[in-house]
Image: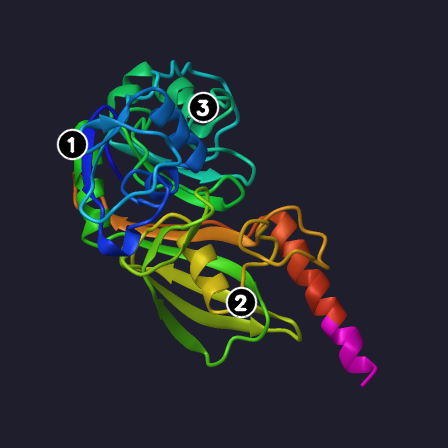
Amino acid sequence: MSERGKKSLIVVSSEDAGARLDVFLAARPELDLSRAQAQRLIAQGLVFVNDQGAKASLKLAAQDQVTVSIPPPEPLEVRPQEMPLNVVYEDEHLLVVDKPAGLVVHPAPGHREGTLVNALLAHCGSELARIGPLLRSGIVHRLDKDTSGLLVVAKSAAAYQQLVRAMKAREVQRVYLCLAHGSIKGEVATVDAPIGRHHHHRKKMAVVPGGRSARTHIRVLERFHDYTYLEVTLETGRTHQIRVHLAFIGHPVVGDQVYGRLRETLKLKRQFLHAARLSFLHPITGEGLNFQSDLPSDLTETLEQIRADCNKKFQHV
């Protein structure tokens, strides 16, 4: 991804020759732009082709040099906000929270309040805002809005740096509980497929050639007629990784409105995905830390409904 506020120079390959300028820019994963955003940059005079201004409709030729200047984002003022926060562990260096489904982790334009970061600033103090990059506020890894479960937050710069290092070294174990559509073959499996920005839908991720390496380990916990209950362990941590990988192998997460099936028969208002276990070495003391979060009531009720339906079908066979 290109850093905002810096220039990017891209040389058009023979494969991209003939593409419209705006379409070409939107397809570049390192820029992370939608087509509309690319068109705005072009209209603002921030895109040049061979050092000349250009229109969005310009057809590119091989070896054209495209220069893109992406302005830095407008600073977001994030204020502390008193909100319920389920803290399962805390010391002077870090805390572990159990995030409910429906809670957004990071503020964004149009969504500046009611996020986990707002709650953390109220709980820990405004100095947390200076831990890690802008708007991270000590958060080392994220969970999607509609994914529940465990998440670790650093309260000091030293803890943040060490936890980030541990994440990159794959020394942090993250285990999820998940319900997938269909019957997955075998009792264990590994999905090893690179993930990047979707070529046409910029807000979605996908398995794409040249994407970032991604590995997901799957273990079957329980089988039903139309579903499989899974334990999923992340080896890497790409955006939407579990959801993308399960959809890629033809078994999308139940309730996933982005990568899942259009019609759901279960009365579940969000994706069946829960970060159930989190294990790592304390970034300062080196002590082994292990945390577990029980399956939330909405997901438990869904499992009970499926089990009851399976029993009814079995009794009528």
Neighbour tally class for label 1: few under 14, some 14-19, many 20 plus, Cα within 10 Å? some
Q: Which residue is mark 1?
A: 158
The label shown at residue 216 is: none
Any part of residue 244 in sight: yes
Amino acid at circle 1: Ala
Any part of residue 287 in sight: no
Q: Residue furthest bottom?
A: 317
Give the Cα distance between marks 3 and 1: 22 Å
Give the Cα distance between marks 3 and 2: 35 Å
Q: Which residue is mark 2?
A: 251
Seen at 40% across and 16% down, the residue is 78
Q: Secondary structure at mark 1?
A: helix
Seen at 18% across and 33% down, the residue is 50
Q: Quadrant location of the C terminus?
A: bottom right
Amino acid at circle 3: Ala
Q: Are marks 1 and 2 in contact (CB under 8 Å)?
A: no
Q: Which residue is mark 3?
A: 119
Q: Quadrant location of the N terminus?
A: top left
Neighbour tally class for label 3: few under 14, some 14-19, many 20 plus, Cα within 10 Å? many
Where 218 falls versus 202 (above or below)?
Answer: below
Q: Which residues are magenta?
A: 310-317
Seen at 45% across and 57% down, the residue is 244
- In the image, taking residue 249 as reference, residue 283 lies left or right, namely left
- In percent of width and height, residue 182 lies at 59, 71
Residue 314 quadrant: bottom right
Q: Nearer the viewer, mark 1 or mark 2?
A: 2
- In percent of width and height, residue 55 lies at 36, 30
Asked whether residue 155 is drawn in magenta, I would say no
